[in-house]
Image (cartoon, rainbow, N blue to C red):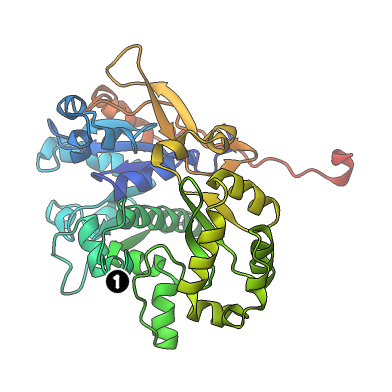
Amino acid sequence: MTKRPLRGIRVLDLTNVLAGPYCSYQLMLFGAEVVKVELPGTGDLARNLGPDAVLNRAGIGASFLAQNAGKKSIELNLKDAGQQALFEDLVRGADVVLENYRAGVLDRLGFGWNRLRTLNSGLVYCAISGFGQSGPMSQAPAYDQIIQGLSGMMSVTGTPETAPLRVGFPVSDTVGGLMAAFAIAAALVGRDRTGEGCFLDLSMLEASISAMGWAVSNYVISGVAPVPMGRDNATAAPSGTFFAADGPLNIAANRQEQFATLCALVGRPDLVTDPRFADREDRKAHRAELDAELNEALGARPALEWERLLSDAGVPAARILTVPQALESEQLAHRGFFTELPFPGQSGRTLRASGNGVLLDGEPLRPATRPPLLGEHNDEAVELARRWTAGTPIPRPAPEPSLTPADKD
């Protein structure tokens, strides 16, 4: 796919585990050339993480494979003077340097922002950290669960009896990676206008609070502190998880007409005229009674039947799937979400690499190569630096000519 908008952009990725690698994976999918700079002998910690101990010992843990297809790997020790020189050459030809060390670590290695911008004035430098590069918590260690707790996210997850609960996947790492990718893309657009690079200081804590949306705005604007509501949606009723004959079902009848349609389809049109459920606020105030009435009616059919019946009538409804069920859905297959790649280090085995949900002119964004073995591209490092610094970049596609009305005809 030659039209990827970041084609020709070069990224030096010094990150580990998830937030940073997830960011550079997004940049790669949009066309960037990503080179992972890994610590000799050990590499990205994610190489040793995942449910398969054999893969972990081989340095290709599932956690690493999930976020690193399409990238190259070189080993560099930034404390070694000779390898520092090679890194400097790479920086001179790079568009982006991405790292997620604790605040100040790269500066202590001699490659803080002041040094990096003397090497390359057009560089976009993005530092992802738990709390940002400044402030009283800047030096505190942080993993995803720490950020989930400090952001307030865990306090609103679960029920009043079970909260606080951790969200079932590393959402703060993921949000931090997405925000970093967005910030980098925006900075590259700005650089095209000014010729100057910039320093992006990304706080996972702040990105997570930003992503919490209404849970935050309801408090800062209206003074209403969010509370854990389990399966229910605080903004409307009936909106949450209900129970069909064979399992759970999400229904979000947030509008008055959707509520009326739902009541008619489950055989309870009387609920529409019940004064307890007359409007949105009444239904929220009497949520428990309404849920009980609907669950009794929904027990007459299996979840899949209700999903089809309600969705066809314009009422948002769907079964609650397991992760394996979700990944095998026809919708994902139709969109080309997964790409089959050779499994690193294991002939005859394939790896399913995920996309990101974006189709570019109708085509899914896919990685072209499998995740790299540690140091797999060490032999290319000097040539890579030469190519990057000698003015022989990956060719950037020329703008496609606009079609005139006559051309379109």
Q: Residues within 10 Å of mark 1 (few under 14, many from 20)?
A: few
Residue shown at 34% from the left, 38% from the top = 67
Which quadrant of the structure image shows residue 313? bottom right
Residue behind mark 1: 160
Does 52 sit left or right of 350 as displayed?
Answer: left
Residue 91, position in %: x, y? 30, 44
Residue shown at 37% from the left, 65% from the top = 230
Compared to 129, does 71 lie above or below?
above
Q: Amino acid at mark 1?
A: Pro
Residue shown at 41% from the left, 62% from the top = 231
| Near-viewer residue (263 or 96) | 263
Residue 71, position in %: x, y? 35, 33
Residue 75, position in %: x, y? 19, 32
> Visible in this render: residue 131?
no
Does 373 sit left or right of 333 as displayed?
Answer: left
| Near-viewer residue (288 or 382) | 288
